[in-house]
């Protein structure tokens, strides 16, 4: 065997997103994310941008995956930082096209010497970049149902439960009754009227992140709701079933909200809590929130100050 050190193959970098398109918005979505769409035109400003694959699920016609290819993660982060305002403008413009978007993950690939195409990492199945894909080009091609997005790391839609028997998933209108039942049983929670929960899922209301913790019997054991306001996200309500407290479920819900905030390019997460709620304050401090202010007599029944906490959202 040769004693010569093996040369490292040059790496490429891919960001993968999943989208659920609103009914009637399929053509608009494909135009926005297509070869002459807003996102591709923005990315083409960078010499480090290699191209985008826009992939449609054959079995679920309103389900899409995008794969944005870059020379390196450093180049991607630099471009994203330098063009932050353009990102936010396009994101706001395209928000009406989708019901949900989800960051699947970030993946490293390698460029072969033969054709300089991207060779997908083994943990990134079925997503090799086509050798004939020109820089800046986008392909729209259907994939068999339950193939790509479900096999990508972190992108499975199938129920997966932690050792506690609970999994965190996006909330839906069907969860409202269970969320209200938990909230009514928690004196320290923010008590909302039922229509307020319905508005969380309305396309006409402010953008919100809503998640639930579900057990194996499909019962809601906790939930969290946060409101997206530009670059900031406000954690409005978080509740954990009395029987599930002190098991780390609150921490998991907060961490998931932080993850979703990061995927929306938020820079700061903030909240207020009753001064007399030591359990909630300990949870937030454990999750990296820092005391940032106070609102006098903010709460009623009984009257009490609100303590403000903030946490910086780390850029990916």
Image (tube, helix red, strand yellow):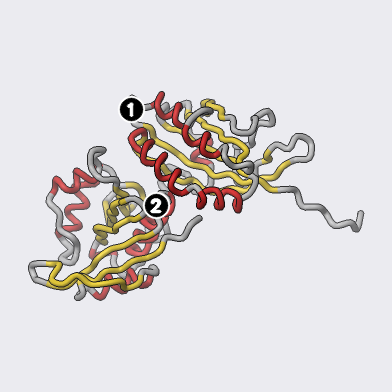
For the point 55% across and 40% down, the residue is: 68
Q: Which residue is mark 1?
A: 23
Q: Is residue 24 visible?
A: yes
Image-quadrant location for residue 102: top left
Residue drawn at (33%, 35%), measured in percent from left and top?
A: 96
Residue 63 location (% of width, % of height): 43, 32
Point 57% across, 37% down: residue:
44
What is the residue that sits farthest to the left in this orientation?
301
x and y percentages locating residue 230 in the rendered image: 34, 50
On screen, residue 204 above or below 294: above
Q: CA distance from mark 2 to mark 1?
A: 23 Å
- Rendered view: 51 above or below 223: above
Secondary structure at numbered mark 2: helix
Q: Toward which corner of the image does residue 199 lie, by quadrant?
A: top left
Outermost residue to the right: 2
Query: Label 1 near label 2: C-beta < 8 Å?
Result: no
- Dot 1: within a 10 Å radius of its alpha carbon, few (fewer than 14), some, or many (20 or more) residues? few
Between 164 and 252, the one lying in front of the other is 252
Q: Which mark is residue 260?
A: 2
Image point (32%, 63%), residue name? 250
């Amino acid at each position: 065997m040769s004693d010569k050190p093996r040369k490292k193959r040059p790496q490429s970098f891919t960001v993968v997103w999943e989208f659920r398109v609103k009914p009637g918005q399929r053509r608009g979505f494909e135009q926005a994310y297509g070869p002459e769409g807003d996102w591709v035109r923005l990315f083409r400003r960078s010499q480090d941008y290699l191209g985008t694959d826009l992939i449609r699920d054959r079995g679920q016609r309103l389900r899409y995956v995008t794969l944005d290819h870059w020379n390196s993660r450093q180049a991607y982060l630099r471009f994203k930082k330098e063009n932050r305002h353009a990102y936010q403008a396009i994101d706001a413009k395209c928000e009406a096209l989708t019901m949900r978007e989800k960051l699947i993950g970030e993946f490293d690939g390698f460029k072969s010497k033969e054709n300089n195409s991207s060779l997908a990492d083994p943990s990134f199945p079925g997503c090799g970049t086509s050798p004939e894909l020109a820089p800046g080009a986008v392909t729209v091609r259907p994939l068999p149902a339950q193939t790509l997005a479900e096999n990508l790391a972190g992108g499975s839609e199938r129920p997966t439960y932690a050792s506690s028997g609970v999994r965190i998933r996006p909330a839906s209108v069907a969860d409202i009754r269970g969320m209200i039942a938990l909230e009514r049983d928690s004196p320290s929670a923010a008590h909302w009227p039922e229509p307020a929960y319905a508005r969380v899922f309305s396309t006409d209301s402010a953008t919100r992140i809503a998640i639930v913790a579900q057990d194996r019997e499909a019962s809601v054991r906790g939930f969290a709701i946060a409101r997206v306001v530009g670059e900031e996200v406000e954690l409005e309500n978080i509740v954990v079933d009395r029987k599930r407290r002190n098991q780390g479920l609150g921490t998991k819900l907060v961490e998931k909200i932080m993850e979703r905030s990061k995927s929306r390019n938020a820079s700061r997460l903030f909240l207020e809590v009753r001064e007399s709620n030591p359990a909630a304050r300990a949870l937030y401090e454990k999750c990296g929130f820092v005391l940032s202010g106070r609102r006098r007599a903010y709460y009623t029944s009984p009257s009490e100050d609100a303590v403000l906490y903030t946490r910086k959202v780390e850029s990916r």
